[in-house]
Amino acid sequence: MDDQNSNGGGAPPVNRFLVFAVYFMGAVIVLLFLGLIGGIIYKIKSRVAAPEGTGFVELGLPAGTQVREAILTGDKLTINTGAEVFIVEVSSRKVLLRVKATSP
């Protein structure tokens, strides 16, 4: 008899482990792919709709006031007029903070 057929005709233990490893990795790849597709679908369905309106935010500034600086950080817009600083939440178009500068 052959040495290969002396163990009952089955695959050697090393080959069984490799076959199991390939099946296991294939199953993991399929599960990760399904999770990716599910995540994409979840992101699409849970999107926040843009607020309706013209997009204007009334700051109530006196006529002739000039904006010295405007900085957009994430969803917050910081507007500096020199006399006042405004922080506006862009998504909701609301003024979160209004700070007046005072002279000493």
Image (cartoon, rainbow, N blue to C red):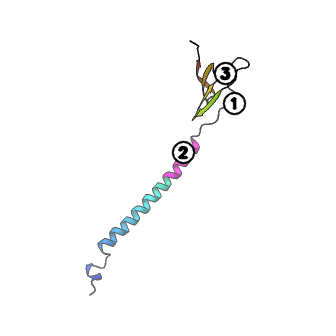
Label 2: how many residues lie within 10 Å, few (<14), some (14-19) or many (20+)? few
**Disc 2 residue type?**
Tyr
Tell me the magenta residue range.
35-57
Kindly identify which residue carries mark 1: 55
SS under mark 1: loop
What is the number of the mark on residue 29?
A: none
In this view, which residue lies farthest toward the front? 104
Report the amino acid beneath label 3: Leu
Provide the residue designation for mark 3.
59
Cβ atoms under marks 2 and 1 closer than 8 Å: no
Task: Name which quarter of the figure residue 102 lies in.
Answer: top right
Q: Residue at x 60, y 22 (%)?
A: 85
Give the percent coordinates (x, y) of residue 76.
58, 31
Task: Please count the marks in the image.
Answer: 3
Along the line of sight, the residue nearer the viewer: 9 or 79: 79
Cβ–Cβ under 8 Å for marks 3 and 2: no
Q: Quadrant of residue 48?
A: top right
Q: Which residue is mark 2?
A: 42
Q: Residue at x 63, y 36 (%)?
A: 49
